[in-house]
Image (cartoon, rainbow, N blue to C red):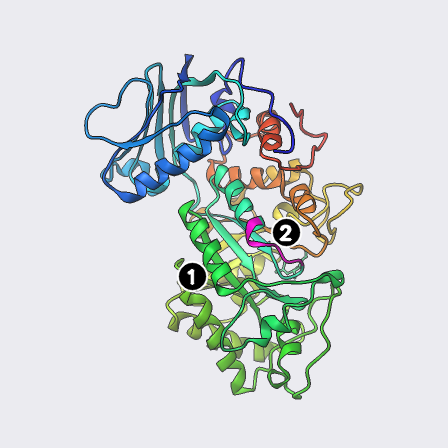
Amino acid sequence: MAEAASGAQGQPPGFATVIPQPLAQAPERGSFVLQPSARIVVHSTAAEASRVAQLLAQSLRPATGYRLPVASMRGAAPEGSISLSLTPSDRALGDEGYRLVVAPKGVTLTAARPAGLFYGGQTLRQLLPAAIEADVEQPGPWRVALGTIHDRPRFAWRGMMLDVARHFQSVDEVERLVDLMALYKLNRLHLHLSDDQGWRISIRSWPRLTTVGGRTAVGGGKGGYFTQRDYSRIVAYARARFVDVVPEIDMPGHMNAALSAYAKLNCNGVAPAPRTDMEVGYSSLCIDKELTYKFVDDVVREIAALTPGPYFHVGGDEAHSTPPGDYLAFMERVETIVRSHGKRMIGWEEVARTKLRRTSVAQHWHDPALARRAVEQGARVLMSPAPKVYLDMKYTPASPIGLTWAGMTSVRDAYAWDPATQAPGVRERDILGVEAPLWTETVDSRADLDYLVFPRLIGQAEIAWSPAAGRTWQRYRWRLANHGPRLRALGVAFHESPEVPWR
Ligand code: TNX
């Protein structure tokens, strides 16, 4: 990759460097050494367990150069193996938890569900030297510190949002991001698929959405869009790594790309010009036209059919040119449409102004009172407070890209907060999880994306996974510093903020 990793000699990473911080750990003295003859043994007939073992093998083969064959087996694993077992009755591990035991004679991973095995595998990756992430063979030895880790997440939703509307990202770029998310145990990829400046997923019943509405981007760039096959490829790739894709079509505002592609969707029947600037709040679907609901139904139906996850995100933010009464009427119909296609509705916090079903979710970004209103209606809240988690905010005034409307967000600011104390009246049990959005008005390349996302996303992953007690910035900055060589080996052009004593 970008830089040659410096080999694997010396001490293996200590348990303390694992991010997100595990629930409980008991390190011991000494190390396990992965040998060229090692096998990955699966004590389960579940196909998903074998798939997880294959992914683990794939992630360890390039740098070690070892064969690491995956074998299903009943009896004891041969000495030196990494073995994976599913124990569905082990309730203490939950749906995503795992137990990892590193002993001199082998590594054992146990989980109740395949997701837990996958996350245990990510922890094991982080316990190997950073050079394990290189894509060409590196010198060993491949040591892992001895001990036991017992782990499970605090929140069920640990997400990132990627805005592919302001600037489009290719399938490969999105898959690369999924890989990086998975390394830090994130499990939801929210794709912001439409906005004023571009429509990014083809809809068969409304082809001009992409052939016309997909041609533009912020700043006049070339645009682009996912075919339905592309989208399905992303969904499958993510799902194999236990990441659910949450599609968003932002409505009734943020609609200029669609309105400019179809004159008939406009109240006055006239298509507005395409837009490539950064304004928000000027466009709206025509609330009184029946065709609007046919359009919404077609779009939700086609995307829902390609999306195995339970959620459909309807946007709903900054609808400043939709009269308030119209907004309420519109959102209630939209919630019914989303349900009719078998999905649960999620929307930005503004949807809490309407009558929400208990199964719906409001995504908090700005106004704590709206988050509370969602909770009062029995709905749950996804926490994305902009000054803490918006990955598009500048780090400091010197940041070459990024916005500043929610302030500047240093690596420390992004880490030193707790979801359960953000909005009065919104308690731990009302919170579905945490999500970090990357809006891409100023993101023009992979390097731009890496700069804004890393390392801040890693802190959000820890906030979403690890208990609040026991997390401190002083310890985290040292732990994060140890991820510098790993990110470099992965080719991630992260922001080397001076707040962190990078190695
Ligand atoms: C606000 S946050 C928006 C987006 C912009 C973002 C830029 C939210 C729900 N809407 O339309 O891209 O600010 O930071």
Q: Which residue is mark 2?
A: 386
Which residues make up the magenta segment? 167-172
Q: Which residue is mark 1?
A: 307
Q: Is residue 56 left or right of residue 496?
A: left
- Number of numbered tags placed on the structure image: 2
Q: Which of disc 1 and disc 2 is earlier in sequence? A: 1
Q: Residue furthest left?
A: 75
Nearer the observer, 175 or 468: 175
Residue 308 at least partly seen? yes
Q: Quadrant of residue 337?
A: bottom left
Q: Which mark is residue 18?
A: none
- Mark 2 Cα shell of 10 Å, populated few (<14), some (14-19), many (≥20): many
Residue 315 at least partly seen? no
Q: Quadrant of residue 456?
A: top right
Residue at image coords 58%, 64%: 200
Q: Tell me the quarter of the image containing the N terminus.
A: top right
Q: Is residue 452 above or below residue 191?
A: above
Q: Is residue 168 magenta?
A: yes
**Does mark 2 have its CB less than 8 Å from ligand 1?**
yes
Q: Quadrant location of ligand 1?
A: bottom right
Magenta stretch, main secondary structure class: loop
Nearer the observer, 6 or 279: 6
Nearer the observer, 237 or 369: 237
Q: Tell me the quarter of the image containing the C terminus.
A: top right
User: Could you give the CA–CA distance between mark 2 and mark 1, rounded to whole angstroms?
Assistant: 27 Å
